[in-house]
Image (cartoon, grey):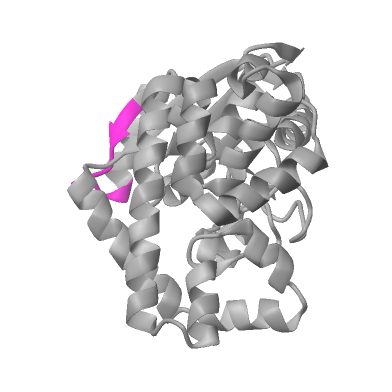
Amino acid sequence: MRTIVALVGATATGKTDLAEALAGAIGGDVVCADSRQVFRELEIGTGKPTPVQRAARPHHLFDALSLGAHASAGWYARAAGETCEALLARGNTPVLVGGSGLYLRALMHGLHAQPPRDEAIRDRLQAELAERGSEAMHARLALVDAETAGRVHPGDPQRVLRALEVFESSGRAQSSWHARATREGLAADWRVLELTSLPRELSIRIERRTHAMFETGLIEETRALLAAGHREPLEALHAIGYDEAMAVLAGTLDRAAAEERTSQRTRQLAKRQRTWFRHQVEAARLASDGRDAAELLVGARGLLGL
């Protein structure tokens, strides 16, 4: 039986530690399913498994790309598909872990036809964004592609502009492109578990994790990235935590304000992730609140039938 385990859920719910424990219990290999953790230069701010955890068992795709490389659901479906096929051929169970739902869906259900790109339209939309702001551009998107507008946050101008570019260049909504699969998903017995947490408890977890990241060297890691010449790709990534660390280094935020802004953006991300997984992924669900690591592992194995 070709079995693939996927542990998903909002950021800061405890997915990483549970995935490590689960992989250890079943002899599985951990496979990254997170759009930020695939960059090898990003460590502290992405919540990757620790070096100790990665040394304990095989891990895959956590350092697959360098900053500046283009990460997409299409790239991930190909890379993770090849990784999982190789593991399954050796009799190993892939244990996917991450919060990037689009990546998981691309791997499970297949890739889609790629809409065209038009740099002239893109440049014009960028100019309009600078003049009118992201909220106004998102409102325009809602008029022509309500489905995509419902998935994309107004504060994510890159995705808003891409959806508008797709519509203007092709005459079709981005959501209609995504509805057309052109490559089949990875055939397997998929066992999917979403780890959940109550919003209030998750907010506390997020604040603690944010503080820990800054305490353990997020600013120093960011300083080293800038010194190594990674400013442009890091800024283009709009990565939570790294943006704020750059602002501290630039003197436009103090550390306390940086931590608060990081926590706020992380809470917003978690809300979007919860909504996405609730409506887009068929999964067993396990609440992490009030359970210790041993209880979570027992609960996960029971729900997954492992």
- Which residue sits at x=54%, y=39%? 100
Q: Where, by quadrant of the figure, is residue 95 drawn?
A: top right
Q: Nearer the viewer, residue 248 or 32?
A: 248
Region rendered in magenta: 285-293
Q: Is residue 219 above or below residue 30?
A: below
109 lies left or right of 285:
right
- Which residue sits at x=58%, y=56%? 130
Can see residue 160?
yes
Where residue 234 appears, x then y in whole percent? 66, 65
70 lies left or right of 275:
right
Q: Is residue 273 above or below residue 166?
A: below
Residue projecting furthest to the bottom: 251
Q: Is residue 273 above or below residue 143?
A: below
Q: Where, by quadrant of the figure, is residue 173 drawn?
A: top right
- Which residue sits at x=32%, y=69%? 260
Residue 164 highlighted magenta (yes or no): no
- Which residue sits at x=81%, y=42%? 119
Can see residue 305?
no
Q: Where, by quadrant of the figure, is residue 82 drawn?
A: top right
Q: Nearer the viewer, residue 185 or 260?
A: 260
136 lies left or right of 256:
right
